[in-house]
Amino acid sequence: MTFAKGHYDSMYGRIESSWQITAEKTRYEFTIPCNTSASLFLPAPAVSAVKEGGREISHSPGVKIVEMKNGIVKMELTSGHYIFEVINAHK
């Protein structure tokens, strides 16, 4: 499977999530409704391999890096729409 997409209509609004794998990267897209937040765990070889909206995640509004451990970047996200890209480790 190289693509998946779904949503959930919560009491705060629609939560959306999708991902797509290509040879070069994995793209994740998330929508978090107003007045909510989310914890995000993304597999990545390093924090530097993760971009959001084309920029380093440390410079992305609404994204707080919590930790990088065992190939997983843990982040906290405020409400909004996010597009993350993770460079594949084998490239």
Image (cartoon, rainbow, N blue to C red):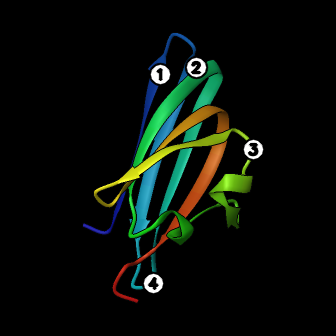
Q: Which dot marks residue 24?
A: 4
Instruction: Please report the residue visible at 31 percent of the width from the left and 69 percent of the height from the top.
Output: 2
Q: What residue type is labelled 1?
A: Asp
Q: Describe the element under mark 4 as helix, strand or loop.
A: loop
Q: Is 11 situated left or right of 72 in this image?
A: right
Task: Give whichever of 25, 4 is nearer the camera.
Answer: 25
Q: Which of marks 2 and 4 is in front?
A: 4
Alpha carbon separation for disc pair 4 and 1: 32 Å
Residue 29 to residue 23: above or below: above
Q: What residue type is labelled 4?
A: Glu
Give the mark nearest the N terminus, 3 or 1. Answer: 1
Alpha carbon separation for disc pair 3 and 1: 24 Å
Q: Which of marks 3 and 2 is in front?
A: 3
Residue corresponding to mark 2: 13
Give the mark nearest the N terminus, 4 or 3. Answer: 4
Residue 67 to residue 13: above or below: below
Q: Nearer the viewer, mark 4 or mark 3?
A: 3
Q: Which of marks 4 and 1 is in front?
A: 4
Instruction: Please report the residue visible at 51 percent of the width from the left and 62 percent of the height from the top.
Output: 47
Q: Which of marks 3 and 1 is in front?
A: 3
Look at the numbered discs 2 and 1 and tell me whether their residues touch, using CB distance below 8 Å.
Answer: yes
